[in-house]
Amino acid sequence: MLAADVLYERRNVAPLADLVPKLLAEGGEALFADPRRAGGELFLREMERRGFSVRSEAAVVVEDGRPVNVAVHSLRRG
């Protein structure tokens, strides 16, 4: 599963946290690219609470000719 820039509002945390387990097989991996918006950390904490393992890496992407710092979060089930 791959998603980008979907964590920009806190109100998206609960629906996403409910959706991921429905779409992801046991042992599967979901990748979320997050430009460090408000809902990101809350989402990760919620997914850990639900039993997912979380790993994050920093990355830099270029948007409109400018570098943007993002985090790539890997969530694993099982």
Image: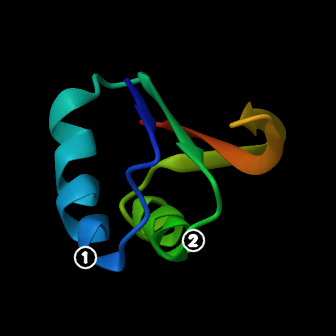
Q: Quadrant of residue 47?
A: bottom left
Quadrant assignment for the N terminus? top left
Using the numbered discs, state the Cα–Cα distance from disc 1 to disc 2 in whole angstroms. 13 Å
Residue receiving disc 1:
11
Q: Residue at x 18, y 55 (%)?
A: 18
> Is 20 situated left or right of 42 in this image?
left
Amino acid type shown at disc 2: Glu
Asked which secondary structure carries label 1, the reply is helix
In-image side of 26 versus 47 (left or right): left
Q: Quadrant of residue 43?
A: bottom left
Q: Position of residue 5 (x, y in %)?
A: 46, 47
Residue 8 is situated, as x and y percent measured from the top left of the image, at: 43, 64
Q: Please, is residue 35 above or below residue 78 in the view?
A: below
Front-most of residues 63 and 28: 63
In x, y percent, where is residue 6? Answer: 38, 51
Q: Are marks 1 and 2 in contact (CB under 8 Å)?
A: no
Local crowd at mark 1 within 10 Å, few (<14), some, or many (≥20)?
few
Vertical side of 78 occupied by 11: above or below: below
Disc 1 versus disc 2: nearer the observer: 1
Could you say whether the residue bearing mark 2 is in a helix, strand or loop? helix
Q: Determine crowd level at label 2: few under 14, some 14-19, many 20+ residues with C-alpha closer than 10 A.
A: some
| The disc label shown at residue 41, or none | 2
Residue type, mark 1 in image: Arg
Q: What colouring method underlies this structural image?
A: rainbow
